[in-house]
Structures are given as C-alpha cells and as structure tokens.
C-alpha cells in the first residue's frame, strides 16, 4: 500500500502530527498485520481465546459466589434474569462506544477510544439494579461489567479499577432513592468518580499523558455520569413493567393524595380514606421496626380498602346519617357484601394500573380471616331459633353448629409477604381501637395482644416469612403507635358545662 514497508522500530505516527489519510492507512495496515499474526487457526485469534477463557473463569466464580452467598428467594430467578439483561445491555453500549471510537473520523478528532471510551456509561447496570433489586446483585453486575469492559480495551487493570469505582459510587447514591432526582444524582456522581480517578491517575503517572487528553477524558467522565442518569430514568419504567417490579420512586408517587384514585376515595368514602391514612401511619412504623419495606406498607395501606367505594354505605366508618343497611339483610348477606370489597378493590386497582405488589396487598390484607361480628350475629340468631324450637339448654352451641363458618371467612389468600402481614395487623387494630370506651395503656395492650394472637392462632401467618420475634416487635410498636394516636386530651374548664338555653333573641343554634 502507499504506506510502504514498516520495520521494527519505525514510527507509525509521530507526536504532534495531524493524522491524515496517509497516517491512517499505515495505522490500519499495522492493525491488520497484528490481527493476522494473532490468528491461531480456524478464524480464532489468540486474544479472543484468552479473553474467552478469562470470561468463563469470571462467570464461574460469580456463579459460585451467587449460589453460596445470595439468599434464595421466590424472585431469585427473575432477579438473575434482570441482572443478566442489564449486564448485556451495558456491555453492548460500551462496545458501541468503542466501535465509534475506531471510526477514522473519530480517530482524527477525538483520538478515538482513548477519549470516547470514558463517555460510555459503566455504572448503568449497577444503578438500575440497585434501584430495582438491591445493592448485592448490583455489586456483582458492576464487577462483571467492569471486568469485561477492561478486557475489551486490552485487559488493563487501571481501567477495571476506574470502572469499579464508578459502579461503587453509583450503588452508594442509588440506595433507597425515593425520587427521580436521586437516580440522576447517582449517575452524575458515578461520572464524577471517573473524572476524579482519571485526574489522580495522571498525577501518579508523572504527567506522561498530555493534559489536553486528560481534560477530555475527565469531561467524558462527566458526560458519562449524565448519560447514566438519563438512560436509567428512561429504562427503569420499562423494566418495572416487564419484570413486574415496583420501585420506591413509583411507590412514593402513588402516595400523593392528589392521585385520581385517592381523590375519588376521599370523595366517595371519606371515612374509609381517613381509616386508610391511620392504617398507613401504623403500618409504616411497624414495618420500619422489622426492616420490611415501610414505603410499600404505607402505599398499600392507602389503597387496601378502595373496593369499599362500590358500596360505601355498608361500612360503619362511612355511616354518618345513622342509617345502617345491614339491619334489613341477613348476616350471611352482610358478610357477602363485606367480603366483596376485596375482590372489587382488586378490579379497581387493575383498572387504574396499580402495581402488582399493591394488588397483592389488597388481596391478602384480610387473609382468610373470620368476619366475626356477622358470624356471631348469625350464631345468636340460630341459637334463638334452636331455643324456641326445642327449648334446648345449650342453644348457643347448637347455634354455632348450624352456622357454616366458611360463609363468614374472607376468600384470601393469606398474607405471603411481611408487608401484607403488617398491614393485616394494623388494619384490624385501627378498626378495633375505635370501640375502646377509654384509652389506657392496659386497654391498648389487651387489644393488641388479643388481635395479634387471634391472627396467629387462626393460621393467617402460615404462608408468611415472618418470625415470632418479628411479631413481638410489631406488637410492641403497634402498642406505642396506637397509644400516641388515641391519646387523651386535656379537659378545659367549662368543657362539660351544661349548655345555656337559647333566648328568643339568639340567632345561633347549638
């Protein structure tokens, strides 16, 4: 070619020389010669075979670590599939940037891969996986992306360390994010980590690299940070939809009282909405006590009774006019109406596109519990009927025998997550606490002990990964929260005085 014959020691491109067509042709010829020399047969290069062997070794080590140290969960397969998807996507983006860096125009303008490589988003997988499934899986993904990326660029240890630093920083800032700005911040600081590492590496290297190149690389790191945050924000909703995962960002948005569904609940069933807010406060505090997802509990509590909007007048918290429609129907029909709010709540949740985790809580917050008021009412009616028919002295037992208990149980399923179990306790206690005639620590203790023991003995926690020690912590937290919520108020002077009769000249009514 026009580049002539190159010998050992010849300079391909001299320093401070503009790269033209001639220099570029010599460079490409040199690369082709290297590739030909690197060929070991069958179209396989030595570099490829070495990288393949190293990749297999890395994947084997990570797989063994994951099997030994990552706890098995019902969603483990989904999480691994998600992690693999994000790793491949992240590596594809980095490979794309490297490919662009090999183009002649980029070699002339930006020195190719030497600068453009730092624009690639190495922490993208780590940030997204931290938000979706947690830091432990994200660390493994960050390690794999960093290792394979360094192999792409020539197995440089310094590149590996810089990319790992970016992933670590992204994971730290992405933990427990509750808004979209937190995701952007995690990406931005990961890019700042790249820029800082490049600057320090240039100082340690004694200034061998040109400062113009270093500044370009540092700028590329900042661009990489912004790119990581923007791509993460765009990809997260897609992954949430396909993998059925709900992030804290989505949950926080759903807790806004101005959401259309919550505004509808406030208008149609204001008593139910107030009850839901109280349950949300109780459940959030109890969930935080045992390390469960407090935000999921709060969000689930706000929506757990949306099914009551269909027949709000059949629920006592919405009966403000003194009319109780249950007085005109049988206990079994009343129980059927009460049970239906769970099924109708699920239908409404699906109609409004609520996440699967919220729908699960709506389905499970009563489990297969007994609707005790109407069950005992049916037993009393049957006992009275048995006594009138035969004069049986043990009419109460006869009444219970005549009532099918299954008709007065919710359809379930029983709680399968800690969050659903916490909400079950909080829901039952908030409703029951309204019947307390006098709020005292002893009365609160007896109420909490009674209801929690009843749920445990009824088998409502049999499918839930909740330990008895956690139940005890939940119980103590609920006692304190209820006592604070129902605290007595100071009786002011004249508060209990008899009202003064109105005189004919008064215009106001008591």
Image (tube, rainbow, N blue to C red):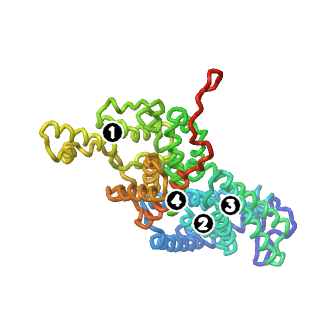
Q: Is residue 64 left or right of residue 31?
A: left
Residue 111 image position (x, y, % from top left): 78, 62
Q: Would you call the spot at circle 4 few (<14 residues within 10 Å), some (14-19), or many (20 or more)?
A: some
Q: Would you call the spot at circle 3 few (<14 residues within 10 Å), some (14-19), or many (20 or more)?
A: many
Closer to the N terminus: mark 4 or mark 2? 2
Q: Would you call the spot at circle 1 few (<14 residues within 10 Å), some (14-19), or many (20 or more)?
A: many
The residue to which callout 2 is attached is 142
Compared to residue 170, the image places residue 262 above or below, namely above
Q: Nearer the viewer, residue 385 or 128?
A: 385
Question: Marks 2/1: CA distance?
Answer: 53 Å
Q: Residue placed at 86% from the left, 62% from the top? A: 18
Would residue 307 be visible to someone looking at this image? no
**Cβ–Cβ under 8 Å for marks 1 and 4:** no
Q: Residue placed at 52% from the left, 62% from the top? A: 289
The residue to which callout 4 is attached is 480
Number of the label disc, if any, that sits on residue 281 = none
Number of the label disc, if any, that sits on residue 335 = 1
Question: Marks 1/3: CA distance?
Answer: 66 Å
**Cβ–Cβ under 8 Å for marks 1 and 3:** no
Closer to the N terminus: mark 1 or mark 4? 1
Is label 4 or label 3 in front? 4
Residue 341 image position (x, y, % from top left): 40, 39
Instruction: Check disc 3 and report its element: helix, strand or loop.
Output: helix
Closer to the N terminus: mark 1 or mark 3? 3
Question: Marks 4/3: CA distance?
Answer: 59 Å
Question: Marks 1/4: CA distance?
Answer: 32 Å
Closer to the N terminus: mark 2 or mark 1? 2
Residue 489 image position (x, y, % from top left): 58, 49
The residue to which callout 3 is attached is 98
Instruction: Check disc 4 and report its element: helix, strand or loop.
Output: helix
Residue 323 image position (x, y, % from top left): 42, 30
> Residue most toward the left?
390
């Amino acid at each position: 070619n026009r580049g002539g014959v190159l010998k050992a020691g010849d300079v391909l491109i001299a320093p401070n020389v503009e790269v033209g067509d001639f220099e570029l042709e010599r460079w490409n010829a040199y690369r082709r010669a290297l590739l030909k020399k690197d060929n070991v047969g069958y179209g396989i290069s030595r570099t490829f075979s070495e990288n393949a062997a190293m990749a297999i070794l890395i994947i084997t080590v990570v797989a063994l670590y994951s099997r030994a140290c990552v706890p098995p969960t019902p969603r483990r397969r989904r999480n691994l599939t998600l992690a693999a998807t994000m790793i491949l996507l992240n590596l594809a983006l980095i490979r794309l940037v490297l490919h662009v860096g090999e183009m002649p125009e980029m070699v002339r303008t930006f020195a190719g891969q030497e600068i453009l490589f730092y624009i690639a988003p190495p922490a993208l997988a780590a940030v997204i996986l931290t938000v979706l499934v947690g830091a432990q899986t994200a660390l493994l993904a960050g390690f794999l992306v960093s290792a394979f990326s360094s192999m792409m660029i020539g197995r440089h240890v310094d590149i590996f360390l810089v990319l790992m630093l970016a992933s670590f920083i992204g994971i730290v800032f992405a933990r427990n994010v509750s808004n979209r700005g937190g995701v952007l911040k995690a990406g931005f600081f990961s890019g700042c980590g790249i820029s800082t590492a490049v600057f320090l590496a240039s100082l340690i290297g004694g200034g061998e690299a040109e400062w113009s190149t270093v500044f370009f690389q540092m700028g590329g790191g900042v661009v990489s940070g912004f790119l990581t945050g923007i791509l993460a924000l765009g990809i997260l909703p897609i992954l949430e939809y396909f993998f059925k995962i709900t992030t804290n960002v989505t949950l926080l948005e759903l807790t806004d009282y101005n959401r259309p569904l919550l505004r509808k609940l406030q208008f149609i069933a204001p008593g139910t909405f107030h009850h839901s807010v109280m349950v949300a406060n109780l459940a959030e505090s109890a969930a935080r006590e045992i390390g469960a997802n407090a935000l999921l509990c709060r969000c689930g509590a706000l929506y757990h009774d949306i099914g009551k909007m269909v027949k709000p007048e059949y629920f006592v918290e919405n009966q403000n006019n003194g009319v109780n429609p249950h007085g005109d129907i049988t206990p079994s029909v009343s129980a059927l109406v009460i049970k239906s709010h769970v099924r109708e709540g699920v239908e409404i949740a699906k109609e409004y596109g609520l996440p699967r985790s919220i729908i699960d809580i709506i389905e499970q917050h009563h489990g297969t519990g007994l609707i005790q008021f109407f069950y005992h009412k049916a037993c009393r009616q049957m006992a009275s009927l048995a006594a009138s028919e035969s004069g049986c002295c043990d009419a109460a037992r006869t009444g219970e025998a005549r009532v099918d208990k299954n008709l007065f149980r919710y359809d379930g399923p029983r709680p399968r997550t800690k969050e659903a179990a916490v909400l079950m306790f909080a829901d039952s206690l908030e409703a029951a606490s309204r019947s307390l005639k006098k709020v005292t620590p002893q009365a609160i203790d007896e109420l909490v002990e009674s209801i929690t023991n009843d749920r445990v003995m009824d088998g409502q926690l049999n499918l839930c990964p909740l330990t008895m020690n956690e139940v005890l912590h939940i119980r103590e937290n609920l006692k304190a929260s209820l006592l604070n919520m129902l605290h007595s108020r100071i009786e002011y002077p004249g508060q209990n005085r008899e009202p003064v009769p109105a005189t004919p000249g008064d215009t106001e009514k008591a």
